[in-house]
Image (spheres, helix red, strand yellow):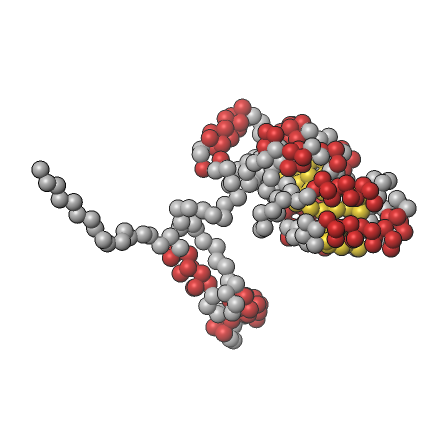
Amino acid sequence: MATTMTVSMTEPKTRDHGAQWRREWADAQKLKGPGLKGGSTFYRNIEEELDLSRQTGGGLPLHLPSHTIDFSTCDVLGLGRTGALREEFLKELDANPGFHITAGGSRLCDGTHKYHDDLEREIAELVGVESALVVHSGWTANQAIWSTVPRSGDVIVYDELMHATALAGMKVSLALEQKPFRHNDIDHFIEVLEEIKETVPLVKSGKRCVIIGVESYYSMDGDICPLRELIDAAKDIFPQGNAQFIVDEAHSFGCMGPNGLGFVNEQGLQDEVAIRMITLGKALAAAGGNPSTCSHRLKIF
């Protein structure tokens, strides 16, 4: 018995998942300053400033996702989409009827509650450090670290690809001398430290510190910090211990290391890093930033 088979040569139709976003983007590039001639100076000046970005295609609109595949999410493990965390969150609320929905004040006044204290103790115990401090975002955490920890007379040394949140904190730091080194370049890092040792007497004498900023995983390039080599080099140049590391673990905590505890733990360098900045809104699919430190005095500071 003969069987006849036909094959369609028509290409299957595919949905253009980016069409809506491109329309929104194109609309956001339309110049608006000229339309406000004779109007409010305040709003016209704002639109003219925005027009500078629009002229180069830099007007980025807020939009609702129209795609089915998300290549930009920070929910890298997909935990935020499972529903499991939502169930656990509601259980936690039910188990803590006295939980304060509002802060009611700054942490230094009456804004610290027992739940905050318990959470920070649990995080510190989990990470294996002396103390932890939870703030509302990774941006705030980096701001808090870099604007307060380096003191007047200290020198900040940082990888040239450090995240903008850390750089923003450095801008208001009391440590006015700040030197980048080429990305992941150990030889250039050593050159920078040697130069500081020879030109900054207070650092050379051990009275002031070099505060070194790196990321574990660099979010835009996806490469990994040679942390152990950098630490060894810093200890050789400054054997008095006045070169200290601050590691941004935003993109490694939760998805690498034993129990997801990050790159520093994976490398066994917990005792060599003064502060680790971890975020709760990426792999952990929650919200908040957390400077975890090896010292309770740093948390108070």
Point out the residue furthest to the top here: 95
Between 73 and 100, the residue placed more toward the observer is: 73
Between 277 and 4, the residue placed more toward the observer is: 4
- Is residue 274 in view? yes
The residue under the point 51% across, 30% down is 89
The residue under the point 23% across, 53% down is 9
- Is residue 138 in view? no
- Above or below residue 287? Residue 154 is below
Q: Position of residue 86 (x, y in %)?
A: 48, 32
Count of labels in the image: 0
Q: Position of residue 61 (x, y in %)?
A: 48, 58
Point out the residue furthest to the left here: 1
Q: Position of residue 49 (x, y in %)?
A: 57, 67
Q: Position of residue 83 (x, y in %)?
A: 44, 33
113 left or right of 197 in image: left
The residue under the point 64% across, 42% down is 216
Point out the image quarter for the C terminus. Answer: top right
Point out the residue furthest to the front here: 1
- Above or below residue 23? Residue 156 is above
29 left or right of 262 in image: left
Point out the image quarter for the N terminus. Answer: top left
202 left or right of 213 in image: right
Report which quarter residue 235 is drawn in: top right
The residue under the point 56% across, 36% down is 255
